[in-house]
Image (cartoon, helix red, strand yellow):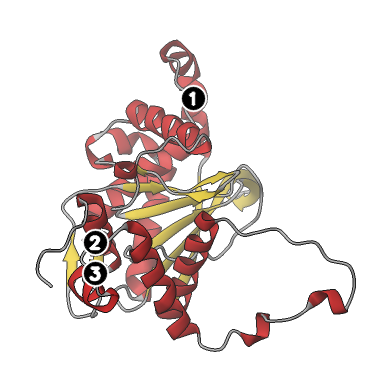
């Protein structure tokens, strides 16, 4: 079957998911391929690796009153992707603390300028700048493994996914070319992407293709967690609510604001020592954030 009909966005998604649309068209016995075909293919792959699902096939009403709510198509696709990632990726999470006293002090100093610019300068903007710098310094983290596991693709761009909690599910719009953007522009784009994600107004071209994703629970709470790697990325960075801890300065304990940095990574590509070095560098950049904009 040679003349396969598929839009550029569908072809791009197929490449991202490692799906050969020629093989898919042959299996479906038609030459018109749409996005839903790729999603169904992914779900089928998940079923193959997860095996028996009879554990979920239970009549819960036998034990008491229940109500039912249909799972949206959006949530079903997300669940399939998460299940595949958790099943197929040998992931490890490295936990680090980043001292953010200097970030918070500088943010307060920049507050009048932020108000004048009409920009909400959040700590997340500093995290994006720090992550972009680390991805340039540690290119193995800015790579993707081919579907057959035989080739590592290094990216010459730095795109940061920003996980956004929305009423219709988790969305991950992508901030493009973060390595070339300053703090103010990044802060502005984060606010814009998050706002439009809440309204489901993020375009298809603004999703996918990230170098790495940041998932931030800082506005909710927690002291640490284990985020799931979002393939075809090889790592994901989790952030939780900052806390103040006592730190010994050689003479006395002093209060120090810190944030937990949780780096999950694909152990097929990244080893523990590299993850520790990456996290240490990330923490060091946040502890002296003025170096980020030099």
Relative horizontal placement of residue 176, taking residue 87 as reference (left or right): left
In the image, residue 31 sits, relative to residue 89, either above or below, namely above
Separation (CA) of disc 1 from disc 2? 45 Å
Is disc 2 surrounded by few (<14), some (14 to 19) or many (20+) residues within 10 Å?
some
Indicate which label's residue lies in the foreground, 1 or 3. 3
Could you tell me residue 116's position as x and y percent?
44, 10
Nearest the camera: 37 or 224? 37
Q: Secondary structure at mark 2?
A: loop
Separation (CA) of disc 1 from disc 3? 50 Å
Nearest the camera: 220 or 294? 220
Tell me, for residue 120, which label it has, or none.
1
In the image, residue 116 sits, relative to residue 187, either above or below, namely above
Tell me, for residue 32, which label it has, or none.
2
Which residue is identified by label 3?
A: 30
Could you tell me residue 144's position as x and y percent?
25, 66
Spot the residue most to the front.
30
Relative horizontal placement of residue 108, taking residue 25 as reference (left or right): right
Residue depicted at x 22% and y 60%: 139
Res 126 → quadrant: top left
Q: Earlier in the sequence, mark 1 or mark 3?
A: 3
Residue depicted at x 25% and y 51%: 9
Q: Earlier in the sequence, mark 1 or mark 2?
A: 2
Spot the residue most to the left.
2
Tell me, for residue 212, which label it has, or none.
none
Nearest the camera: 84 or 20? 20
In the image, residue 114 sits, relative to residue 20, either above or below, namely above
């Amino acid at each position: 079957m040679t003349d396969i009909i598929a839009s550029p966005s569908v072809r791009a998604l197929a490449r991202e998911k490692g799906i050969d649309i020629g093989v898919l068209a042959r299996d479906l016995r038609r030459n018109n391929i749409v996005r839903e075909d790729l999603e169904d293919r992914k779900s089928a792959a998940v079923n193959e690796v997860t095996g028996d699902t009879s554990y979920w096939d239970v009549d819960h009403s036998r034990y008491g009153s229940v109500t039912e709510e249909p799972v949206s198509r959006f949530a079903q696709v997300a669940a399939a992707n998460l299940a595949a990632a958790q099943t197929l990726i040998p992931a490890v999470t490295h936990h680090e603390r980043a001292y953010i006293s200097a970030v918070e002090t500088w943010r307060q100093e920049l507050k009048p300028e932020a108000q004048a610019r009409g920009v909400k300068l959040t700590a997340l903007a500093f995290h994006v700048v720090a992550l972009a710098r680390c991805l340039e310094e540690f290119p193995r983290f800015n790579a993707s493994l081919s579907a057959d596991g035989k080739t590592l693709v290094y990216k010459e761009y730095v795109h940061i996914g920003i996980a956004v909690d929305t009423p219709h599910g988790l969305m991950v719009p992508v901030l493009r070319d973060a390595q070339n953007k300053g703090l103010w522009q990044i802060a502005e784009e984060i606010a814009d992407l998050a706002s439009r994600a809440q309204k489901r107004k993020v375009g298809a071209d603004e999703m996918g293709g990230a170098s790495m994703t940041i998932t931030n629970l800082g506005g909710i709470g927690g002291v640490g967690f284990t985020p799931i790697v979002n393939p075809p990325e090889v790592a994901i960075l989790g952030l939780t609510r900052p806390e103040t801890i006592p730190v010994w300065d050689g003479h006395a304990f002093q209060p120090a604001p810190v944030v937990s940095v949780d780096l999950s990574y694909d152990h097929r590509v990244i080893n523990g020592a590299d993850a520790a070095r990456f996290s240490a560098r990330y923490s060091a950049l946040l502890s002296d954030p003025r170096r980020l904009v030099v």
